[in-house]
Amino acid sequence: MEVEIKRDYYLNQLIARMDNGLIKIVTGIRRCGKSYLLRTLFKKYLKDQGISEDHIIEMAFDLYDNIEFRDPAVFYPWAIKQIEDGEKYYFLLDEVQLLGDFVSVLNGLADKKNCDVYVTGSNAKFLSRDIATEFGGRGDEIHMYPLSFAEFMTVYDGHYYDGWNEYITYGGIPIIVLAETDDQKIALLDNLFKETYIRDIVVRNKIRNAGEMEALLDILSSAIGSLTNPNKLQKTFRSVNQSKITATTITKYIEYLKDSFLIEEAKRFDIKGKSYIGTPMKYYFMDMGLRNARLNFRQMEVTHSMENVIYNELRKRGFNVDVGNITVIESGKDGKAVKKQLEVDFICNKGSKKYYIQSAYSLETEEKTAQEIRPFKKIHDSFKKIVITSNTPKPFYNDEGILIMNVFDFLLKPDSLEN
């Protein structure tokens, strides 16, 4: 029996956007579940609402059987021919970045009064950088991530402590989660990287030296949660790889990795100056299993893994996430003024909501607790300040009004930050 993974968070977003006149665009990393969302879960919902099968028009452009339909001169007439009456038609189009001139084609379909268009895509350069501009204001994006920890636990047979170890090791790509053995998971992750993600990036961007880009990917995999920039990465290449790669080429490769949704970039924000600082920045992987596979499952630090998972969860919940920076002047040992930089792991913004969050795997001593909350004491506003840890029994507020929360309470309760 096939296991159905519920993706209600995304399904409900599609349902809420039905018949709004816009092109619904589900973006996300390859194999994160976009096709399943659109062509299984959403299609089932449509049929449950009484929509007949012949009014649900599907096309998967990544299948060899449909390769001829990548030509807009073939696909568009075919699509128009499917519309036989005045009833509503729902177009579910998969991996639409493979369709030539897809913006014009989709706008043409969406212009029909009885067509509601839903598409998926795995390439940010084509689909996500400026959807409003590309589609003339007719694009409506839903960005999809691999399984969150809460989604993962709906199909994991065991306690969430054990599930956590599995999740931060092998990640949340659905086909990996459903694989039965560790060996299968490792083999699938390795194959996905080589045959899907790397190949996609190399072919799409016509990269001549794929080894250089893969070496960069390895360095970024080792450096999650660490501040870095192209110049610093260039020095690492020189010392470790004896490479003459330029900072410009590194910047270009990073853009390719971001465009494929493999990594995301968190910028630094000066909390007191209320402005972005620029470099260095942090990079986080969209899936911990893919990150770990790059390093052959070495460097499995739970501290960095937890920080990466928290970042992904915040992004999944729709927050813009920056790294906070606070410059303070303090007296040194000799009594002279010393300038120091304090860091807040995440500043999260969504509309009027704003949170400052520290990821601290363990608060085993008073000194460690003081270290984590020290930056919060330098922030003079009333937005909620939160420390997420792994060893707090249940959420509580300390004497400074800072919320200390267990990572499982944070991840498993969708409204955890509002408590």
Image: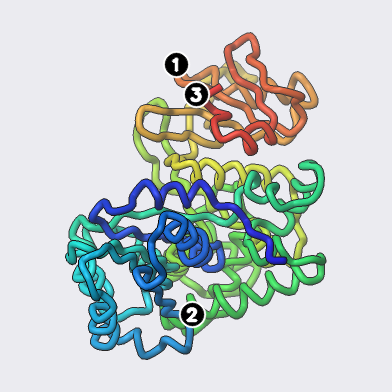
Q: Quick check: 301 left or right of 84?
A: right
Q: Position of residue 143 (x, y in %)?
A: 43, 54
Q: Position of residue 286 (x, y in %)?
A: 56, 56
Q: Nearer the viewer, mark 1 or mark 3?
A: 1
What amino acid is labelled 2 in the image?
Val
Across and down, in percent, residue 58 comes to 40, 73
Q: Nearer the viewer, residue 197 or 234?
A: 197
**Residue assigned mark 2:** 202
Q: Secondary structure at mark 1?
A: loop
Q: Which of the two residues, 249 or 71, is positioned nearer the viewer here?
A: 71
Tell me if residue 172 comes above or below residue 369 in the rendering: below
Reading the image, the residue beneath label 3 is: 328
> Which of 237 and 314 lies nearest the eye of the viewer?
314
Q: CA distance from mark 1 to mark 2?
A: 47 Å
Q: Secondary structure at mark 3?
A: strand
Q: Which residue is mark 1?
A: 382
Q: Which residue lies at the image location 74% right of the left edge and 21% below the top edge?
A: 367
